[in-house]
Image: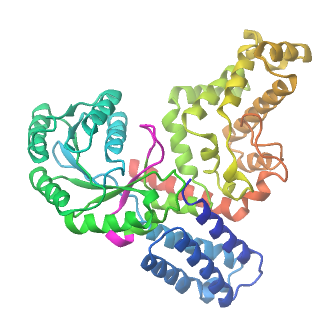
Amino acid sequence: MAFESLTKRMQNAFAALRKKGKISEADIKEMMREIRLALLEADVALPVVKEFTKAVSNRAIGAEVLETLNPAQQIVKIVDEELTKTLGGDTVGLNKSDKIPTIIMMSGLQGAGKTTFAGKLDNKLVKEENARPLMIAADVYRPAAIDQLKTLGEQINVPVFDRGTDISPVEIVRLGLEEARENKNDYVLIDTAGRLAIDEVLMDELKQIKTIANPDEILLVVDAMTGQDAVNVAAKFNEDLGITGVIITKLDGDTRGGAALSIRQVTGAPIKFSGTGEKLTDLEVFHPERMSSRILGMGDLLTLIEKAQLDYDEKKAQELEQKMRENTFDFNDFIDQMDQVNNMGPIEDLIKMIPGMSQVPGLDNVQIDPKIMVRQKAMVQSMTKQERENPDMLTPSRRRRIAKGSGNTVIEVNKMIKSFNQAKEMMQMMTNGDMDKMMGQMGMGGGMPGMPGGFGGGRGIKGKLGDMAMKQAMNRMNKQLKKKKKKRK
């Protein structure tokens, strides 16, 4: 996952401060030196590093910080705010036309992920807005580019306009826009050609497409794994084409992630989305505040909540809440919950969104085997209908029978039942609004409740979370939730 090494370095710098009762200017200078090195190692552009560290230093060295009861916490708050500012400040959505269609022109180098992003964005628009988009295949140079776009279109049931490879991309765009207006499509996504490097021929063609299409959005797609090159590409495209937004792909890869921290400052164009995987659903709106939280190891509870809301049926959620209140949560519900969590993505990625979890030693290397879930489902399926609905029936002899029927050991069956009981207990606390007690439970060791086969153990999670990370994250989440409620009104 991107930013992991940067997160570690930032946390180490803060940890050194937290150990001291009082903080001096020398301590802050030492911390800023560590942060500066961490940012440079993460491939953040030097001018951006200088501007960021200067802004933090100017705010941190002052009586209002150094003389407070908890200066370390104040400094983390300052770093968080300045990091959010560097990443763009506010979340910026798609530019939309007053009348349909909204025209979105994709641009970027070959291999950055333009075509895949077009499919992901259309999928999002169809699901969230019930939109009727059209994709225009204007990349006539890359082998199989048109076929790739058509395949994506078939998967999400979105039409693709193409005229093969024998006419100019500019003419294809003109004809495609005519069809979109006739069919009253809500959105048009133009998939343009890329090159391995920027050249005059490419820019000339893109300028012509821009002139004929008059797009509402010119989105530049950059590959996070190219590091500093992504920033240079963004600067050049912005200079020649006037981009309105940036998409960062492969932000889930083994990358230092510095491009995300540099692009906004270098181009002035906001980052609008990030690609976080290969599936069509692996697309996230880019929220600078939330990304700052992740980088500083404070988790991202709001995105975690949104993922859960997106992947969980509202009616089912209400039924589950009722079951928790009536204490009738059973093994059928447990399996259903596992399926829902599985749909949200890899569990290890979800765990990292919990505030402070990035500080747990060894978490970076944790990979939860999806086969564990398969085995646990097999155990439940080896139970009778009565046993699934009444977990108290599971006597030792019944557990032996379930182990044999599912091809597992009795120890594994006992572990699964323990996970079930922990998940049930934690969900009851959440339903009753008892978050403090729930966090206490998480700190008892023996693993994360509800995680397959247990997770972690040892010293207990609460001690590792750090009060500051949890408090900062919860404050931020409450603030963002209030903002969302105001927007709805």
| Residue 411 in which image quadrant | top right
Where does residue 323 sit, x and y in percent of width and height?
Answer: 67, 25
385 vs 240, left or right, is right
Task: Check the image and tell me how it is coloured.
Answer: rainbow
Question: Total marks drawn?
Answer: 0
Where does residue 453 sit, x and y in percent of width and height?
Answer: 76, 34
Residue at the spot 62% in from the left edge and 86% down from the top edge? 29
The answer to whether residue 329 is seen in the rendering is: no
Q: Is residue 282 above or below residue 20?
A: above
Tell me where the magenta segment starts and ends, as one range.
265-283
Where does residue 220 sit, x and y in percent of width and height?
Answer: 30, 56
182 vs 265, left or right, is left
Whether residue 273 appears in magenta in the rendering, the answer is: yes
Which of the two residues, 437 or 363, is positioned nearer the viewer here?
A: 363
Residue at the spot 16% in from the left edge and 59% down from the top edge? 201
Whether residue 250 appears in magenta in the rendering, the answer is: no
Which of the two residues, 291 or 484, is positioned nearer the viewer here?
A: 291
Q: Is residue 191 above or below residue 427?
A: below
27 vs 399, left or right, is left
Q: Is residue 200 above or below residue 102?
A: below
302 vs 286, left or right, is right
The answer to whether residue 309 is seen in the rendering is: yes
Residue at the spot 13% in from the left edge and 50% down from the top edge? 213
Q: Is residue 59 above or below residue 339?
A: below
Residue at the spot 72% in from the left edge and 62% down from the top edge? 467
Where does residue 239 sit, x and y in percent of width and height?
Answer: 23, 69
